[in-house]
Image (cartoon, rainbow, N blue to C red):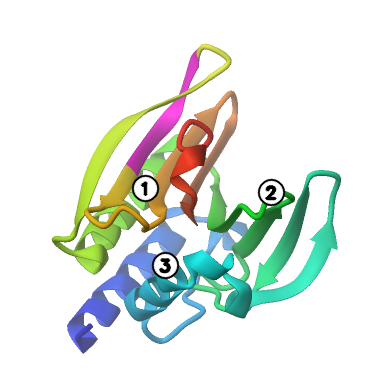
Amino acid sequence: MTIPKVTKFASVIMGLSLAGCSAQNTLSLGVDDPCASLKGIIADYPSGFEQYRGSASDFRSVTVYSATEQIIRGHCEIWAWANNDSAYVCSGNTPDDEVATTRYDAAVTWMDNCLGDGWQAQESERIRDGENAGMVTRFRSLEAEMPNVSVHKVAFRRDSAVYVYVGTPSRLAEF
């Protein structure tokens, strides 16, 4: 990754932070090179993101770890289910759907540039309880053993958020 790409991503994050017009909705980078970090996280998928697991919180069907590699500072976790299935997730709430759309579009563009030609993007609607619940762009690698990487814009009822998911393709219906 070149310095201009890091600068561009940092500019996008800064712009997204300001777009919210609220201190509660600002985002900042947690790493110097987010594309290199994402590629490292994807490479660690076969181990369940073990090298990126911080402190754990156990719940009935999932253990949630704070991620030691925070692409977006303070907003990334690793979810580990009992069946040895896990996901790296970064999410950020937004004050409204307009900010969510801006963040989603910027994240999809960045993700596409970071992952490169070996990945194919497909955008579709998210449906929840029979209602449109936002958009998702899923990136699939041409290599079969790679995880699903996706960017989601969740707009359901009065809540809006954008998140990035790296995990098993078997959860495509959920993520």
Give 113 or 166, whichever is nearer the viewer: 166
Observer able to see residue 105: no
Residue under the image location 33 percent in, 44 percent down = 138
In the image, which residues are magenta? 131-137
Closer to the observer: label 2 or label 1? 2
Percent across and percent down for residue 60 are 86, 45
SS class of the residue under badge 3? Answer: helix
Reply above or below: 50 against 1.
above
Percent across and percent down for residue 123 are 28, 36
Give 156 or 175, whichever is nearer the viewer: 175
Closer to the observer: label 3 or label 2? 2
Sequence order check, earlier mark of 3 and 2: 3
Residue under the image location 42 percent in, 67 percent down = 42
Label 2 Cα neighbours within 10 Å, binned few <14 / some 14-19 / many ≥20: few
Q: Which residue is mark 2?
A: 83
SS class of the residue under badge 2? Answer: loop
Q: Which residue is mark 3?
A: 42
Magenta stretch contains residue 55: no
Secondary structure mostly taken by the magenta-highlighted segment of the chain: strand
